[in-house]
Image (cartoon, grey):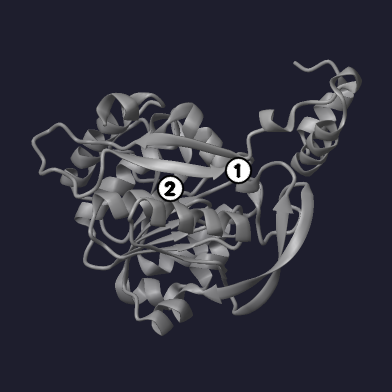
Amino acid sequence: MDTNPIRGFVRRHPALRQAVRRIRGRLPPRLGGIDPSGVPGRRSFELALPRRGDGRSPAPGPASLSLNAPSGLWVPRKLEQDGLSGFEPETLACFLATLDHAGPGAVLDVGANVGVYGLLAATQSTRPVRAFEPTPQIADTARELAAANGLRVEVAEMALGNRTGHASFTLSSTSDASNSLASGFRPEAGRIEVRVDTLSRWCERSRTTPAVIKIDTETTEPDVIAGGLETLREYRPWIFCEVLPGHGVEERLMELLHPLGYSWYQLGDESPPPERTVIDGRIADGAQRMWLFAPEPPADALWEDTRAWRRALDVCHPAAAAHRS
């Protein structure tokens, strides 16, 4: 634990931390200055991708992705430290399995951040991939990563919600992965104005048929669902959705999804997970924040493929790309 309260305060506020670094870069070492060249502006590494070893046909994509991103972004830092084996592997395994079992259509990554789900979908399937990220720097990074790896992922710098137009978007001082349309969700470092559209209007305008949708929008997931009810009724996509407790998310999701005949499963170490009668954001043993909302009862083959993908993800450690390239 950091016993220096000032240092601890600075570390908890990214904007202040960057300002302190800039100031220290101008000071001589005797006054606590640091060499600016020692503060990396980018992080660059290879991210090992899962490769199933069960006799399945080779995946269409590469064995790894080249990631080059601003050093302050949370998701690239997490991936460099832990690899995909430490980045929601329970959900990623089911997501990858669903790509093979869902009907025809596109993959939508809503609240994409730098686009991990979208990038994986583009490497492991031939489905069209569309990503939505309203934070400008993060959306730019997602585009750069897709282009650098030759992947066809279209990134829209916008949020999806229950209305169209523009809205105030909160930049979190805790982590850029906590930016949200929900004011007060996290301590804020500032606000920006972003474009907002509904899922149904966007799909109609772009003539997109969604087959698999991942939603992680920091407590506004029900708004995304509410703005896409027509699309969900017509196309019945499989949905992966984060559920955070204490914000009324669970009740609203059940009210919206129950009339559509969706069933829900909290993803975790147990495979297959039991069907839940209630959506509850609290984490049980081995469970995760991410849920599967299924338009039909999942087949045994989907859970078999989920287990196979989980085994493949478990060996995607930070150094694995160098050994497998």
As drawn, is 259 to the left or to the right of 190? left
Compared to 301, does 184 lie above or below? below
Label 1 SS: loop
Residue 165: horizontal and vertical position, in percent? 63, 80
Left or right: where 89 falls relative to 201: left
**Which of the image's four quarters has the N terminus?**
top right
Q: Label 1, on which residue?
A: 73
Q: Quadrant of residue 266?
A: top left
Relative placement, left or right, of 45 versus 72 is left
- Labels 1 & 2 near each other (Cβ < 8 A): no
Instruction: In the rendered structure, find residue 116 and report the number of the disc placed on it.
Output: 2
Which amino acid type corresponds to the residue marked 1 in the rendered image? Leu
Disc 1 crowd, CA 10 A, few/some/many (<14, 14-19, 20+): some
Give me the residue at 26% from left, 51% from top.
Answer: 98
Numbered tag placed on residue 97 in the rendering: none
Q: Quadrant of residue 83?
A: top left
| Mark 1 and mark 2: Cα distance apart in space | 13 Å
Q: What percent of the width, then of the height, locates residue 278?
A: 47, 49
Instruction: Identify whether 248 is placed above or below 83.
Output: below
Q: Tell me the amino acid under the disc marked 2.
A: Val
Q: Residue furthest right?
A: 31
Above or below — where is 106 with respect to 321?
below
Work out whether mark 1 precedes mark 2 in sequence or the reverse, and give the earlier one.
Answer: 1
Q: In what quadrant of the picture does the C terminus appear? A: top left
Residue depicted at 64% across the width and 47% down the height: 176
Query: Closer to the camera: disc 1 or disc 2?
Result: 1
Marks counted in the figure total: 2
Residue in the picture at 78% in, 47% down = 187
Q: Position of residue 159 (x, y in %)?
A: 57, 67
Element type where label 2 sits in the image:
helix
